[in-house]
Image (spheres, rainbow, N blue to C red):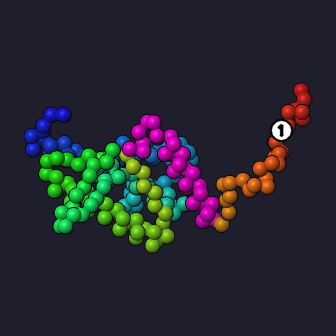
Amino acid sequence: MGKLSPEQRHKQMAAIRGKDTKPELLVRRGLWKRGFRYRLNHKRLPGHPDIVLRKYRTCIFVNGCFWHGHNVAVAQVNSTVLVGDSECCKMPKSNREFWVAKILRNKERDKAEQRKLAEMGWHCITVWECELKPAKREETLESIAFTLNHIWLQDHGVKVNYRTPPDEEDKQLPMAAEDNEIKR
């Protein structure tokens, strides 16, 4: 990768926006396709969540791995903060102190906002940019749908048992249409 001049780097970084990003659009399309309806960037909620599903009292934050420090290892030695790279988040080598401070502030702000939302009775889901790569996208979207349905059932007092009790494993459950019943 070639080096960019400070003006080129500034132009490149200034072009990055916080709303309607590609990962956010992928999540929105996936939710819409699965029948979930939502609002965008609710101004009255802390952190202005990317996606708000009022029926489920759930906020979804779609985070870029770099900007929010996904899986970044943070250690403090004496008065120095050490930050290690992760698989999907590489810290810049130039102006490192600035970027480390910025990403750590973002992480702290995210925690504080989600804590406030939880105190208000909202559920929070964080979707990371790396979870939306083509190989993992459908699994991630299905996981979000499963979580939303689970939240709705839980909030409406429906008890869900995801494991089959041991005594019912051996029973043959009735089928909706048995093969021998269908005659033409």
Question: Residue at horizontal 16%, vertical 52%?
Answer: 96
In magenta segment, residue 55: no
Q: Which quarter of the rendered picture does the C terminus lie within?
A: top right
Quadrant hosting residue 82: bottom left
Question: Callout 1 environment at 10 Å: few (<14), some (14 to 19), or many (20+)?
Answer: few
- Secondary structure type for disc 1: loop
Looking at the magenta stretch, what is its main secondary structure? helix
Is residue 33 visible from the viewing direction of this image?
yes
Q: Nearer the viewer, residue 65 or 118?
A: 65
Relative horizontal placement of residue 102, taking residue 34 as reference (left or right):
left
Question: Residue at horizontal 27%, vertical 49%?
Answer: 85
Q: Position of residue 12 (x, y in %)?
A: 19, 42
Question: Residue at horizontal 40%, vertical 69%?
Answer: 115
Q: Which quarter of the rendered picture does the N terminus lie within?
A: top left
In magenta segment, residue 153: yes
Q: Position of residue 131 (x, y in %)?
A: 42, 45
Reply above or below: 80 against 5: below
Reply above or below: 79 against 52: below
Give the extent of the magenta segment: 130-156
Amino acid at the residue labelled 1: Ala
The residue that disc 1 covers is 177
Question: Residue at horizontal 67%, vertical 63%?
Answer: 158
Quadrant hosting residue 153: bottom right
Relative horizontal placement of residue 78, taking residue 7 as reference (left or right):
right
Q: Position of residue 84 (x, y in %)?
A: 26, 52
